[in-house]
Image (tube, grey):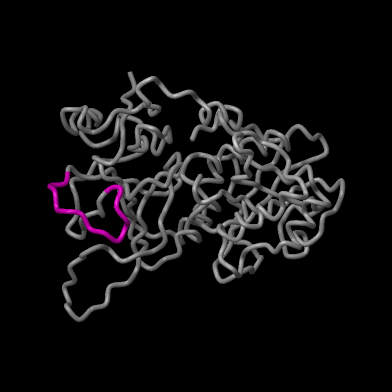
């Protein structure tokens, strides 16, 4: 499936039930919108209900919908009613059919949506709430993290993100990257695989530690830039390391124990260009010094923000809420951050582009 073969069109009244099917498959029951809610949004704000369609046969495979609000911050009240001519867009849903996920559709939809919104002179910006594992996706689309949302909807915590249309963004550049035609050999990534190099010496600077190459998703079909040159430090490993699950097997499935070539150590999630995280999980086959100890689910695996490929590395949250830490770091509250935290990317699970 190529993004070039998809079209962006407004969702019509008779297509709302299909949108509901995608909505129900995308959210847990306590978070999903009802048919009445989607119908209300399509009737009152049809120009904000944008779909992604296949051409043959014409089928809705993804959509986003919104209403207008005079409030620059989202709340239950500001998301409950459409206020015509209000200056802020309250985005309610960004949903992709399960068969088309991890293919760049969500990012392409968000990019197209923001381009259209920016063309409306009366709009000042867009707002949405999301769970912390999707913050990297919306960041890549141009949104900025505001902080923890006051909205309570379902069991999981929400975070508010925003984009203001007076600010400079690179949305148009991202749109070009999404629909770029692959090379004849099918390779879209500008990076080369680990085994194309003669060892770590070719990928670090003169100090023997800092990465001199940009790091990309390991899938040759994916162009996602994970980390820029100079942002990571090579480490051989730690006594607390464990064997990462194999690619592309399920996260809970441990792989054999090959000799590790080390990790790229990154001190902050904000140092990444793009990165995604799994939900908290137990480390696979992690030995415990106390056989009676019950290990806590504190591990987050690092995955590609575009295609969800992974695990590419890992991070130990030590029981802390990573979303709250990101919020504190954005607000400059250094005292609330853990000392010595690391986000580790396996050097063999990324592609590299060495800058000239």
Quick check: is 19 in the magenta stretch?
no
State left or right for residue 208 relative to residue 7: left
Vertical side of 36 occupied by 223: above or below: above
Q: Find residue 332 and report its horizontal and vertical position in percent.
A: 52, 52
Quick check: is 248 in the magenta stretch?
yes
Vertical side of 235 occupied by 188: above or below: above
The range drawn in magenta is 247-260
Q: Find residue 224 and report its horizontal and vertical position in percent.
A: 43, 36
Quarter placement of the C terminus: top left
Residue drawn at x 59%, y 40% is 142
Residue drawn at x 25%, y 45% is 263
Vertical side of 312 occupied by 169: above or below: above
Q: Find residue 159 and report its horizontal and vertical position in percent.
A: 59, 58
Q: Residue 278, located in which quarter of the rendered image?
A: bottom left
Residue drawn at x 79%, y 40% is 123
249 or 240: nearer the viewer: 249
326 or 247: nearer the viewer: 247
């Amino acid at each position: 499936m190529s993004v070039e073969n998809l079209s962006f069109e407004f969702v019509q009244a008779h297509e709302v039930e299909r949108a509901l099917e995608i909505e129900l498959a995308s959210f847990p029951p306590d978070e999903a919108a009802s048919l009445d809610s989607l119908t209300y949004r399509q009737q009152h704000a049809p120009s904000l209900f944008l779909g992604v369609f296949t051409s043959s046969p014409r089928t809705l495979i993804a959509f986003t919908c919104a209403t207008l609000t005079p409030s620059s911050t989202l709340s239950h009240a500001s998301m409950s009613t459409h206020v015509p001519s209000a200056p802020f867009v309250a985005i309610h849903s960004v949903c992709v059919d399960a068969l088309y996920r991890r293919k760049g559709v969500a990012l392409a939809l968000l990019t197209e949506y923001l381009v259209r919104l920016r063309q409306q002179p009366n709009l000042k910006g867009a707002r949405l709430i999301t769970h912390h594992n999707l913050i990297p996706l919306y960041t890549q689309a141009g949104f900025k993290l505001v902080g923890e949302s006051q909205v309570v909807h379902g069991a999981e915590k929400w975070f508010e993100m925003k984009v203001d249309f007076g600010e400079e963004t690179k949305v148009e550049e991202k749109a070009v990257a999404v629909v770029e035609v692959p090379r004849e050999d099918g390779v879209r990534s500008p990076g080369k695989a680990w085994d194309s190099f003669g060892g770590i010496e070719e990928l670090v600077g003169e100090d023997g530690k800092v990465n001199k190459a940009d790091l990309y998703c390991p899938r040759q079909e994916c162009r996602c830039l994970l980390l820029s040159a100079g942002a990571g430090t090579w480490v051989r490993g730690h006594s607390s390391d464990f064997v990462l699950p194999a690619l592309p097997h399920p996260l809970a499935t441990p792989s054999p124990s090959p000799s590790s070539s080390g990790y790229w150590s990154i001190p902050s999630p904000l140092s990444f260009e793009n990165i995604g995280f799994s939900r908290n999980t137990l480390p696979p086959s992690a030995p415990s010094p106390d056989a009676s100890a019950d290990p806590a689910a504190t591990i987050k695996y690092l995955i590609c923000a575009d295609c969800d490929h992974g695990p590419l590395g890992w991070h130990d949250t030590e029981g802390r809420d990573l979303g709250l830490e990101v919020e504190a770091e954005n607000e400059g509250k250094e005292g609330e951050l853990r000392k010595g935290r690391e986000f580790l990317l396996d050097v063999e699970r990324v592609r590299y582009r060495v800058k000239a």
